[in-house]
Image: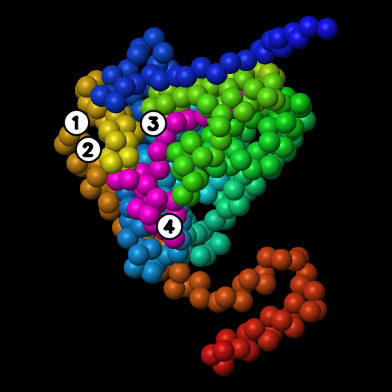
Amino acid sequence: MPRKQVRLEHSVEYLSVMDKRGRVDEKLAPKIDNERLLEMHRTMLLSRRLDEQMLILQRQGRIGTFAPAIGQEGCQVGAMAALSRRDWFVPAFRETSAMLWRGFEPTNLLLYNAGYNEGGAIPEDSHDLPIAIPVASQLPYAVGLAYGTDYRDTDEIVITFFGDGATSEGDFHEAMNFASVFKTPIVFLCQNNHWAISMPRRRQSESKTLAQKALAYGMPALQIDGNDVFAVYAAVEEAAERARAGKGPMMIEAITYRMSVHTTADDPGKYRDEEEVEKWQEWDPILRLQKYLKAKKHLTDQQIDELEEEIAKQVNEAWEKADKQMQELDDPSVIFDHLYEQLPEYLKAQRQAFEQRLKHGG
């Protein structure tokens, strides 16, 4: 029998709406009102300045290790702005910008990164999941959540974030397969920032794109300029409409760049060239959006300066509040409080012994 070609349904397209000078293709641009655009810009700028302040605080030993989102603000805010507050948000560990858009307080992010779980508490009425540190571990949870929203016949969908390195993990493939088979209403957003810690994208996968990995699961995929808030918004809006219509999941590969450290325990100077970073600074998502807003007369340099002062004050006040709360949260024995509704006898004994050691300076 002769060989026959297997015809595949999907291919991968690339979407970019705004160039690095802030010029937008109006035919491709999604409809976003000016007020919302300015809110998106403010959140992106707040995220950048908060990350910069947290880097200083970490170097001073006042908070612990964390993963800055510097350079990826447009990808995160553009995605979340395209969704409803009723939709579910499942982050990884670098989603500062997305979390701020969803209403997380800077004070709580500071507390969490200082090692206080109180800062990571999720309000009962929110549709947000906690930060997930193990790479790709959040993806099966996100798919299960989407399966649940579909089972309950709600109008809610799920978006989950992950990096390029996560596409090499088994959890990623298991989640993609389940999501596609059961047509769960979920958007897989891969932030391809070119580095999985010190491993460059070119050494992670021989695939021409990461988006094409979705095709193996019969799932549509789109690659976009992840530093273009308009492209991100349009892509997520399309994927969300598809999911809500019962047509199942979609994967978006957002091409962005990690302009800072992987985490504060990392030194990128050991494995990447400064020239590469400088090249990507030309595609800075905040500067590009500012160029657009100024060209459209929606924002002026003076207003940006005033906004910078306002945000600097907000970040400083958030740290003062967090620092005060940390001084009040000085009882480490609370680690026993959230394991069981009724503490077993052996843990009661452990808690008593622990408190005795603390009392005697042990």
- N-term-proximal mark, 4 vs 1: 4
Res 243 visible: no
The residue positioned 31% from the left and 22% from the top of the image is 19
Extreme-bottom residue of the structure = 360
Task: Please state the extent of the stretch shown in magenta in the rendering.
Answer: 250-274
Q: Is residue 254 magenta?
A: yes
- The image quadrant of residue 263 is bottom left
According to the picture, the residue beneath numbered tag 3 turns out to be 227
Q: Which amino acid does label 3 sit on?
A: Asn
| Quadrant in which the C terminus is drawn | bottom right
- N-term-proximal mark, 2 vs 4: 4
> Compared with residue 336, is residue 254 higher up or lower down, i.e. above or below?
above
- The image quadrant of residue 220 is top right
Kindly check if marks 2 and 1 are in contact, taking CB atoms under 8 A apart as contact: yes
Q: Is residue 149 left or right of residue 58?
A: right
Of 96 and 174, the residue lying toward us: 174
Q: Is residue 198 magenta?
A: no
Please state the horizontal and vertical placement of residue 229, each as a whole percent of the image. 40, 28
According to the picture, the residue beneath numbered tag 1 turns out to be 300
Separation of residues labelled 1 and 3 (CA atoms): 21 Å
Label 1 crowd (10 A; few <14 / some 14-19 / many >=20)? some
Residue 304: numbered disc: 2
> Compared with residue 282, is residue 250 higher up or lower down, i.e. above or below?
above
Label 2 crowd (10 A; few <14 / some 14-19 / many >=20)? some
> Compared with residue 174, is residue 296 higher up or lower down, i.e. above or below?
above
Please state the horizontal and vertical placement of residue 305, each as a whole percent of the image. 19, 41
Residue 266: numbered disc: 4
The residue positioned 45% from the left and 46% from the top of the image is 96
The residue positioned 40% from the left and 38% from the top of the image is 257
